[in-house]
Image (cartoon, rainbow, N blue to C red):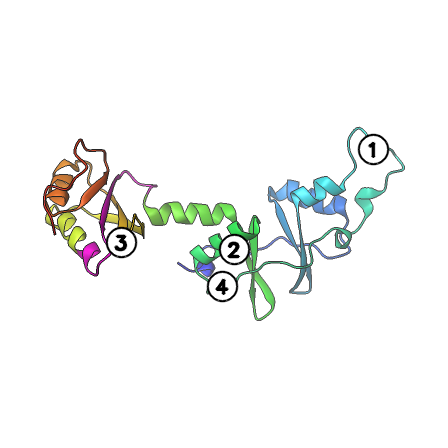
Amino acid sequence: MLIEEIMHRHVRTVEPETTLKQALHLLEEHRIRHLPVTEGDRLVGIVTDRDLREAGPSILEHSPQDDTLHRPVSSIMKREVITAHPLDFIEDAARLMYEHRIGCLPVLLEGRLVGIVTQTDVLHTLIELFGVNKPSQRVEIEVPDRVGMLADAAQVFRRHKANILSVIVHPGSENTRRIAFRTEAMLIDEIVRDLRAAGHRILWPPVEDQEPEGSK
């Protein structure tokens, strides 16, 4: 799935001369946490609710003479902004947010701000892609790291006419792969039995004997 499929195209922005007070009002009014700073349609920075809270006066220290909230956002905005492209993949956006510990990615096309995607957007999309937003069961197996093992295991689900919502493959122990299936089948005992009979080690659901019943 691509960023352009989930990004918000109507982006609330501020200009460099917008005051901190005005920016705070926008965040509260629209219940958002990030404000790209633009000049025309060009991104020049970004401010977050955390930036504004940290820059604003403390309730205990505030005085009538304090003009902190009248400062422009350009005085606190981050100028080096991590961005995404509309044709980037969702998983790449998730990696960028994780690596840089940021909560959003402004989306640029030919240097123009065309959207924004947040951690919440990415998390919601990944939940849908993994199929955990629907009634389903997880079956996880460990297989030798060889070509065709995924197809072999998927055939078991096919024989039981069990619809597979998602498949996740990740490294197992030495020379193995772990494959996690999310299936709409509610009764998976027979599927698990046939997977074991085909020589696959069952990691989930728990079984008394973790050794496979057959061998490849």
CA–CA distance between discs 1 and 3?
A: 62 Å
Q: Earlier in the sequence, mark 1 or mark 4?
A: 1
- Asked if the residue under mark 3 is in contact with the one under mark 4, i.e. CB atoms within 8 Å, the reply is no
Q: Where is residue 90 in the image (x, y as percent from the top left)?
A: 44, 56
Q: Position of residue 119 (x, y in %)?
A: 51, 47
Q: Describe the element under mark 4 as helix, strand or loop.
A: loop
Q: Which amino acid does label 4 sit on?
A: Pro
Q: Where is residue 129 in the image (x, y as percent from the top left)?
A: 35, 50
Q: Tell me which corner region of the image, top left, top right, bottom left or bottom right, holds residue 11.
A: bottom right
Q: Which amino acid does label 2 sit on?
A: Leu
Q: What residue type is labelled 1?
A: His
Residue drawn at 21 percent across, 55 percent down: 150
Q: What stretch is highlighted in magenta?
A: 132-151
Quick one: 140 or 187, which is closer to the camera? 140
Front position among marks 1 and 3: 3
Q: Name the residue under label 3.
A: 175
The image's mark for residue 96 is 2
- Asked if the residue under mark 3 is in contact with the one under mark 2, i.e. CB atoms within 8 Å, the reply is no
- Asked if the residue under mark 3 is in contact with the one under mark 1, i.e. CB atoms within 8 Å, the reply is no
Q: Which of marks 2 and 3 is nearer the N terminus?
A: 2
Q: Mark 4 points at which residue?
A: 86
- Asked if the residue under mark 2 is in contact with the one under mark 1, i.e. CB atoms within 8 Å, the reply is no
Disc 4 crowd rating (10 Å Cα; few below 14, some 14-19, many 20+) is many
Q: Position of residue 174 (x, y in %)?
A: 29, 51
Asked if the stretch drawn in magenta spans residue 145, the answer is: yes
Front position among marks 1 and 2: 2
